[in-house]
Amino acid sequence: MCTYTTVKDTVDGSAKGPGGTWFHVSDVTVYFDHPVHAMAEHTLNIDFADPGKGPAARVALELTAESAQRLIAAVQAALAAVPDEMRV
């Protein structure tokens, strides 16, 4: 069963895409659904994109729920170790 819950937001960063080229990412879409490639029934799917540069300016992740929770914990731990004055 799918929830069709989709969360969209803006981000400011860079991603390495097709052909090994870097591009700016401005949008993120997160949803839990059937994966396209990962070998799992459902995954947390995260798409980083720059819509102004067309469909090739996109990086997609498909993570199992357990892997997604570990990623969240790792991101939180990394950010917690950064002094406040460096968080710009």
Image: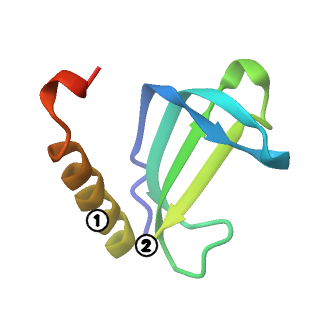
Whether residue 78 sits left or right of residue 34 in the image: it is left
Q: Say which residue appears at 36% left-offset and 64% top-offset.
A: 68
Where, quadrant-wise, is the C terminus in this rendering?
top left
Q: Say which quarter of the image contains residue 16.
A: top right
Q: Say which quarter of the image contains residue 51.
A: top right
Whether residue 29 sits left or right of residue 14 in the image: it is left
Q: Residues within 10 Å of mark 2 (few under 14, many from 20)?
A: some
According to the picture, the residue beneath numbered tag 2 turns out to be 64
| Label 2: element kind | loop
Q: Say which residue appears at 53% left-offset and 80% top-offset.
A: 40
Distance CA(mark 2)–CA(mark 1): 9 Å
Q: Position of residue 43 (x, y in %)?
A: 47, 67
Q: Is residue 28 above or below residue 54?
A: below
Q: Position of residue 33 (x, y in %)?
A: 49, 61
Q: Say which residue appears at 49% left-offset and 35% top-offset.
A: 28
Q: Is residue 1 above or below residue 40?
A: above
According to the picture, the residue beneath numbered tag 1 turns out to be 69
